[in-house]
């Protein structure tokens, strides 16, 4: 009996039907994948080019301060993952989805790679402020942030002047507290009493 493929609407499609619908290569390939036959080589050891997270806000109107608070929480999560993976990045990207289902991205590259929360947050806030006219006009249903152009070994280029405060020890201390007592053990003052929607990773580490 010929093998069949169950479609998402419940109809069963034979392999030859898929060839007719999608062509010889596409039909055979889809049929093989549906039966756990994949000849493609598995590549291991490849690291992602970016680390990010996003959060759905729902359809109700949100105050800009609430959006900023959500963004800060996302940056906390992203930079914590960067430090855990020992990877610094140079490009911060803000991802927005509006109430009319359109999307927009804004990005900015830094002069040096970083994994510090404050540096990434300051950049993300600037991008969010620049996009405020769009947010006010269209409404916002999703916000996300990602850091890309990641280095391979956590290397951070120093720059002058050396007197700029280094907040790496503070970040490390907060990471240690959250690792031991949970991610909600320490939070920002702007997020106290706020019920933030669950964060959804954009990319894995």
Image (cartoon, rainbow, N blue to C red):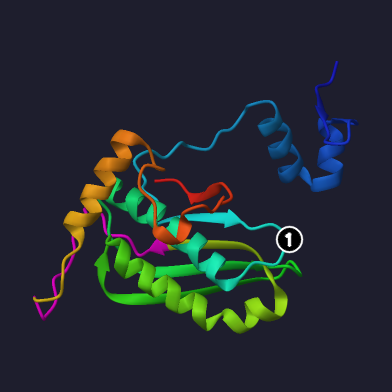
In the image, is 46 to the left or to the right of 24? left
Query: Is residue 78 positioned above or below 101 on the image?
Result: above
Question: Which stretch is magenta?
Answer: 147-162
Residue at the spot of label 1: 59
* Residue closest to the far front: 193
- Within-10-Å neighbours for mark 1: few <14, some 14–19, many 20+: few
Across and down, in percent, residue 204 comes to: 44, 46
In this orientation, which residue lies closer to the viewer: 159 or 47? 159
State the image coordinates of residue 190 (x, y, percent, origin top left). Answer: 45, 61
Res. 56 image quadrant: bottom right
**Is residue 155 shown in magenta?**
yes
* Tally of marks: 1
Indicate the quadrant where residue 60 lies: bottom right
Q: Which residue is drawn at 16% across and 66% down?
A: 166
Place of residue 124 in the rendered image (x, y in percent of width and height, measured from the top left):
43, 71
Q: Where is residue 61 in the image (x, y as percent from the top left)?
A: 70, 67
108 over 12 or under it: above or below? below
**Which residue is outermost to the right?**
11
Answer left or right for 178 relative to 170. Answer: right
Secondary structure found at label 1: loop
Name the residue located 51 percent from the left edge and 52 percent from the top edge: 193
Predominant SS of the magenta segment: loop
- In the image, farthest residue toward the left: 162
Residue 69 part of the magenta segment: no
Side of 196 where 122 appears, left or right: left
User: In the rendered image of this protein, does residue 16 appear above or below residue 64?
Assistant: above
């Amino acid at each position: 009996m010929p093998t069949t493929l169950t479609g998402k609407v419940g109809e069963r499609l034979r392999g030859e039907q898929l060839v007719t619908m999608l062509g010889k290569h596409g039909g055979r390939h889809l049929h093989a994948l549906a039966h756990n036959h994949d000849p493609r080589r598995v590549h291991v050891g490849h690291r992602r080019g970016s680390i990010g997270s996003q959060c759905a806000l729902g359809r109700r109107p949100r105050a800009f301060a609430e959006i900023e608070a959500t963004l800060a929480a996302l940056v906390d999560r992203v930079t914590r993952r960067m430090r855990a993976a020992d990877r610094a990045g140079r490009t911060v990207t803000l991802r927005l989805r509006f109430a009319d289902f359109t999307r927009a991205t804004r990005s900015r590259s830094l002069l040096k790679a970083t994994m510090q929360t404050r540096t990434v947050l300051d950049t993300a806030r600037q991008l969010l402020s620049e996009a405020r006219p769009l947010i006010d006009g269209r409404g916002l249903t999703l916000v996300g942030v990602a850091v890309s152009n990641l280095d391979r070994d956590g290397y951070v280029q120093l720059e002058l002047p050396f007197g700029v405060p280094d907040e790496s020890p503070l970040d490390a201390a907060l990471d240690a507290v959250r690792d031991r007592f949970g991610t909600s053990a320490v939070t920002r003052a702007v997020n106290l009493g706020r019920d933030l929607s669950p964060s959804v990773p954009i990319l894995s580490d």
